[in-house]
Amino acid sequence: MFQPVRGRPDLPATEAEIAALWKSAGIYQKSLDNRRGAKRFVFFEGPPTANGMPHPGHCLTRAIKDLYPRYRTMRGEFCERKAGWDTHGLPVEVEVCKSLGIHSKAEIEEYGIEPFIHRCQESVWRYMKEWETLTERIGFWIDLSQAYVTYHQSYVESVWWALSELFNRGLLYQGHKIVWWWPQGGTALSSGEVGQGYRQVADPSVYVAFPLLDANGAVTKRSLIAWTTTPWTLPSNQFAAVKSELTYVVVRFQDDPEHEYILAEPLAASLAEKKKTKIEILESYRGSDLVGMSYEPPFDCFYSNSGPRDATLKNGTNEPVAWRVIEADFVTTDSGTGIVHIAPAFGEVDYSVLMAERERFENELPPLINCVAPDGTFTDEFPSMTGRFVKECDRDLTRDIRSRGLLVHQEQYLHDYPFCWRADNDPLIQYPRASWFIRTSNFRDEMLANNSQINWMPEHIKEGRFGNFLENNVDWALSRERYWGTPLPIWVCEDTGKAEAISSYDALLAKPGATGTEVFDQAKVDNPDLSEDLRVHKPYIDAVTYDSPFSAHARMRRVPEVIDCWFDSGAMPFAQWGWPHEGGKDFQSQWPADFISEAIDQTRGWFYSQLAISTLLFGPESTSDAATTNAAAEMPPKDYPHPFRNCIVLGHMLGEDGGKMSKSKRNYKEPSEILDRYGADALRWYFFAGQPPWNSIRYSEQSIRESVPEFLLRLWNVYSFFIIYANIDGFNPAAAMNDPGQLDHASLTAGNGFRPVHERSELDRWMLAELHATTQKMVDSLDSYDHYVAAGALSDLVDAVSNWFVRRSRDRFWATGKADISADGNPEKCDAYWTLYEVLTTTARLAAPFVPFVSEAFWQNLAVGPFGNGVPESIHLTDYPTANTDLIDPDLARQMALIREVASLGRAARAQEKLKVRQPLSKVEVILADSHKNDADWLTSHADLVCDELNVKSFEICAEPDRYITRTILPDLKKLGPRLGKKLPLVRNALQQADAAALINSFHEDGLATVTLQDGTDVSITEEECLIRTTAREGWAAAEGTRGVVVISSELTPELIAEGRVREVIHAVQSQRKTVDLDFTDRISLGFVTESEELREALQKHVKTIASETLAVSISFEHVEDAEEETLDIDGHALTITLNRVVPPETS
RNA sequence: GCGCGCGUAGCUCAGUUGGUUAGAGCGCCACCCUGAUAAGGUGGAGGUCCCUGGUUCGAGUCCAGGCGCGCGCACCA
């Protein structure tokens, strides 16, 4: 006896029971133990941050991350799943600041770094509970208890090791970088943060004259015109850039005849237009002719001091260190003047100009000119505006330039400009800051080589988004002037400035004269709950200093910075084990990952940080050696790809409106709400089967709801059908066999009453063939990470079971006799049960990685129920099914598809003629397409089935097809195209006009036919090169499909009409039984009252059929007493049906 | 602006090296079944495959250029 099943499943409730079962029985752990020692399937968890609430996108990621480990485990591999949490970084600090009601660095320091760090560490776990709940609820099996945590000491120390290696190899250096700087907040913003803050604003756009100097340094009447939208950068001007190949012209404006100006030729006319004046072109130069000229900068703040000072180049000649025309590729004529004002302090390209210039000089290098302080105000070096915020000086600066006759033109310029995303009135500025970098650009080719070996899904990521990103690699700006992060493990000599990197806390303590640990110890005494891990964090770590090896009596002190938290997560492949300080075995066996998956935003994030770190530390070019830190540690193999081989890049999840999901727009439902209403399996199936994973996916409740009936509900209905009748018939697999194994085909073969497949009905053979073909397809797809195709195959299988196998097997399930091998057993019925049982248990296993809860519920009831300990106690402890290829039968699959199409075409033909299926018809004829000619005999032998499906009296393959159809010979373009090329259209015409019958004849007699083309040439064509299309002629009740044409006889005899009416009446009685709420075994007495002689005769003639179909024990042609009564219209004849339940006589 | 992706039925999406009649689900309309039954099934209508050009015997598919959307990078003197 199976547990009775409700018709309408309550999936969320079922899932809760299953989850409890897994937990109490420790199934996840057992699924691992089961595979210990087997081939490993290595999975890396990209650490989410528990500092924010999980949202629907995380559900998708977690579902995909669960699918493949589950699948591989069932396939016999050992897949450990270690959870992890990303805990560092600005977002955490921001959360804390919000709760404290502060936001600037000054306020943080005022609050105190120590308590601030404590709050950060607590804040990290703010939504921990929600994350753990979601993880379990969605069925993501991962070991949360052993999670790696990026702020833990062992993790931090692994990161330190990596950084110290890089430092020792000269790959970690300090340099300057132009960053987007938030002056009021005193911090740089990450590109992601900057991206959020762009706004369209109107800035002043000024065309400024830079007067050229003659050989003696005297101002001439000729000026360059430079264009800028940031007048505040003009005092810091250092160069003017032109493009060598561009043509520049010397012009005179009609409204300003005193001066001559130089600008790019293509832009001269438009500037004149803007000035509403005319120009005269005096001369033209190539850009390269201008290079080297000196000019007077618009402000003299630096000029007056140092003037146009010269310095010696490496080639021995002299050049001014500033205010000189240089050549640059990035100059364009898209806007401006073709002459670019260069202020290296305030732009990345500008800064690179300065760097390039410095390369040219021998020893006295061009300085970085900058008269702006980090707080965004002018310094003393620009006395006229000292202390004022630069952005507010644009107007006054412009006025100043105009008063000195240097303003050529001014206008408003609309463009996007970034503001601080947290203080949206604060504009950001580009500003130089000292920063630590990793020399990743040296490893660009290495990273590309590594990347080329990775299996990216979708493929275009490799060469596209990710490849491009690597191509444009710049050194990794690693340091952050913040508080909550992995401290940069570099200690600097206070005397000499020489630095060294530290690879672990113990190594630090082992340094001569190390002191300062007591600061943390004291804090621990004051607050015993303080996390030990904070020992390696600010401010405690900053207190640890030691004797300098570089200078007697000097101390080594740590630099103040922490690092980019992306480095943390990228170091996860080894840092999760604390390697190389510990965890050597784990790292060896769990590297590289076979599989990772995250959303597309991680191309710049975790995908990159992992690849970069791995390439630098473990690539063939690497000279890193962990053994210097820990003699027991072994470096991993170097061959690419690492640290991951296969990566599914998920599309972004969009809200209901197709836009970005946003809390404030409320355009999506909380995951918990969806899970409570539809269940995790519904959500998972929607993710897996709804679209290829890399598509962006619109997360809408409606789509999720609609995905349920198509697969889960259909499967559930088949399951519940089986349970209902198996219980009625007492079908008990456990009574039939001792060793059920995992209930796969081979084990079932031993069952009593389980007949060999070849002895069973064709329907069973077909069903099992489909089952095993689907199994094969799913395994192939999942092995190549294509779960979308696998899900489609599974869905088709369920459709086949539900809509063909069960439908066509109903009679067997309802037949008399028992479902066993006893004397009164019915072997056909037994077959039906065994087949459906095999299909259900195997389908459940096929579905297990996709919908782990429902499939477990099936297994518990279908397998564990009857067999107890004889079978694995959970479906997730079984092996994934493998196809029994002997059972796959492509011919039968084709034939069954044919008969399903015939039935469907027959119904289409009926519908066309408005002949409902209840109306019996005399005949159906089928004309098979040539491709299915060979199945004619097979189809004929299934006449009964066709007749039954279509409610017709007889079936035949049409003997005179030409009555009903015409044939058209079409060229098989795929075959003829390559052979005939341009002649193809002619051939096509010729075939269209040719006599199809004659051609077919010719094919049959000569094996080929010759057609004469319009151009007079002849072409021979074989039958294989043609397709013969069959079209139904007008005037018949016919429908055509790809496999043939089905013709229904629409002729109605009085006898057929009578039968139709009887069926109509039976239908009415059945409906009435239902409205009266009779049980389906209740007997009735029936009375028919009608004025129509014709109808009464028909009913009388088929009284037996009516009785058996409706379970009527008596049928009279008068009112039945005390009966339910209903009058209806049968083809224009009024009929009153009276119906009464017959109380069965007491049986003693 | 540059790069990547996307644009197919009312909606959500498939469409496998270019090939003859472009598919599914939902919704809609009509119907069937009434022993899976507050289920299930069938049929139908519905398409300028974003636009324009090109390559080709042949383009939803390949190429170029637009337009629109999403994402990433950069923001431009």
Image: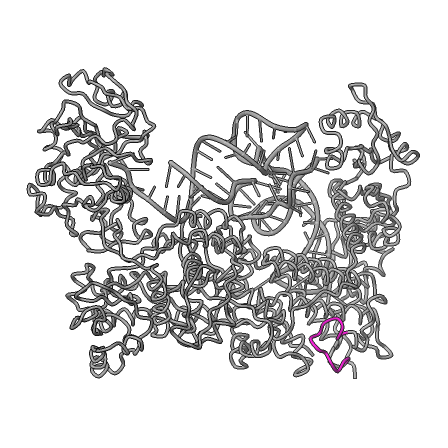
Q: Residue at x 46, y 59 (%)?
A: A598
Q: Quarter holding the N terminus of chain A?
A: bottom right
The answer, for residue A579, to whether it is visible in the render is: no
Along the viewing direction, whichever of A923 and A225 lies nearer the viewer: A225
Question: Which residue extends farthest left?
Answer: A384
Is A735 magenta? The answer is no
Question: Which residue extends farthest right?
Answer: A1005
Q: How many marks?
A: 0
- Horizontally, residue A1013 falls left or right of residue A622, namely right
In this rendering, the answer to whether A505 lies above or below A457 is below
**Residue A862, quarter of the rendered image:** bottom right
**Residue A568, quarter of the rendered image:** bottom left
Along the viewing direction, whichever of B5 and A1077 lies nearer the viewer: B5
Q: Residue at x 67, y 60 (%)?
A: A798
Tell me which secondary structure the magenta stretch mostly adopts.
loop
**Residue A726, quarter of the rendered image:** bottom right
Question: Which residue extends farthest front?
Answer: A316
The answer, for residue A889, to whether it is visible in the render is: yes
- Horizontally, residue A284 falls left or right of residue A1146, namely left
Q: Position of residue A222 (x, y in %)?
A: 17, 23
Q: Position of residue A922 (x, y in %)?
A: 86, 46
Q: Position of residue A429 (x, y in %)?
A: 22, 46
Along the viewing direction, whichever of A1009 and A486 lies nearer the viewer: A486
- Horizontally, residue A169 falls left or right of residue A1052, namely left
The residues colored magenta run A736-748
Q: How is the image coloured?
A: one colour
